[in-house]
Amino acid sequence: MKAEDVLKISGDIEISKFTDKEYLLINSKQDSYVKINKQSFCVLSLIDGKRTLNDIRNEYNLLPYKDVSIEQLSALLEKFIEYSVFSGSTTVKKAKIPNYIKFGFIILKPSVISRITPFLEIFFRKKMYITVFLIGVSVFLYTLYKNLENPVHLDIFSMLPFFFILMAFSVFFHEFGHATAAYHFGAKHGGIGGGFYLYYMPVLFANVTDIWRLRRHERIIVNCAGVYFELILYIFLSLIGLLSSNFTIQFLAFFILIKSFYNLIPFLRADGYWILSDLFNKPNLSSHAFNNLKMIFQSLFKFRLPRFRIDNYLLAFYGLINILLIVMFYYYNLFYQYKIILNFPIIVFNGIRELFKNANFRIEIRYFFKYFSVLIFYLITIRIIIYAIRKVIRNNR
């Protein structure tokens, strides 16, 4: 860019306040959202289709910030070209699928979802939150008390069709929770699709990126909405199971609840991650957390602490807790469940073989948790191995 160039902001661009020092740059045509600082906001505010770059530089340097040169200003503005901020720049195709989803595809278009969300909005009335939560806790405690010490008798073959149907309905209902919450607060929702997270974990997703324009507490509610909807489904199924004395239905409901709580674990890019991201107002939560933790450790070697705000120390603490929990999880499984880990492939193989010989399956709930813990151990280990291999490949290119 040259000093005499004149730029104009595209009509597709909207800038909204994110925090006291940050703003959100929104391209409605691309569905892209970029967080910018106050200095960048001031520069973009001076672009009116009449001022040259030199005029913008001169007016910006009157503000209480560090002076910039034409070269620095040009370098900054060129970074915005890929987001089609300026009139006449090429518009990039809409990103309908989150970039952390691999081999993604859309199952339900936004137009289909928008016909259903108005009917589900009733669940987002304030009194409804408390009612659902209290009923859910009561049903869970009663079911747990009634079944914890009792052996579980399940007819696996007859249960499997219902299991897959309910799991499919559960994950769709979960994503409809996010979409309905976004609709409730006036944010646009994209489609519901599927794909693979970390290349091996099949997932569904609802594109609700537009919620970044909402207030913080509204974003948190949207990100909690999937688990909230699964809690509603859990209550419905549990009551049917209790009233009919059908343990199979109770077990399926309990499995849905466990699956929904798994979404609250903030280690993967699931609901728990985005909830914390909203609490800290940090879209890239993990990178901020580990970067802050790294800076603290580097400073400790110099016998001082970095001048962080309290939220940055909390972010570093989150990063530390992440690491410690993973270490503790590995310690527990490697030292207390190593026999199950070593025999887990055989256990799975024998279990599948037994299913074809005998449809009746006998297991106690405490063993269910042990096997589930080992399953997560394998999944996390595979994730680490894949990440390490990809890193080695990148470094050798």
Image (tube, grey):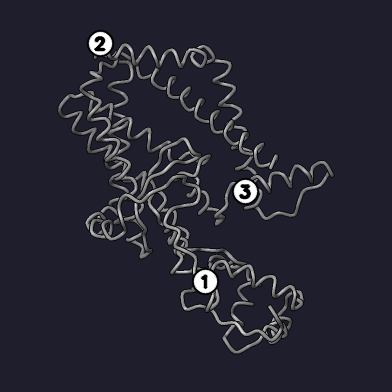
The residue lying furthest to the bottom in this view is: 50
| Label 3: which secondary element | helix
Residue 239 percent across, percent down from the top left? 21, 34
Residue 322 percent across, percent down from the top left? 59, 37
Where is residue 316, by image quadrant? top right
Q: How many neighbours does mark 2 have within 10 angstroms: few (below 14), some (14-19), or many (20 or more)?
A: few
Q: In which quarter of the image is the N terminus?
A: bottom right
Question: Measuring 44% from the left and 19% from the top, which residue is drawn there?
Answer: 370
Disc 1 target residue: 90
Disc 3 target residue: 287
Question: Measuring 20% from the left and 22% from the top, which residue is drawn there?
Answer: 158
**Cβ atoms at labels 2 and 1 below 8 Å apart:** no
How far, Cα to Cα, is label 3 from label 2? 49 Å
Amino acid under label 1?
Thr
How far, Cα to Cα, is label 3 from label 1? 30 Å
Where is residue 250, by image quadrant? top left
Tell me which numbered mark, 3 or 1, is placed earlier along the sequence. Answer: 1
Amino acid under label 2?
Asn
Task: Please tell me whether mark 3 or mark 1 is closer to you in this view.
Answer: 1
Q: In this view, does 353 lie above or below 80?
A: above
Q: Quadrant of the C terminus?
A: top right
Residue 358: numbered disc = 2
Q: Is residue 142 above or below residue 69?
A: above
Question: Measuring 37% from the left and 58% from the top, which residue is drawn there?
Answer: 190
Residue 42 percent across, percent down from the top left? 63, 77
Task: Please tell me whether mark 2 or mark 1 is closer to you in this view.
Answer: 1
Task: Please tell me whether mark 3 or mark 2 is closer to you in this view.
Answer: 2
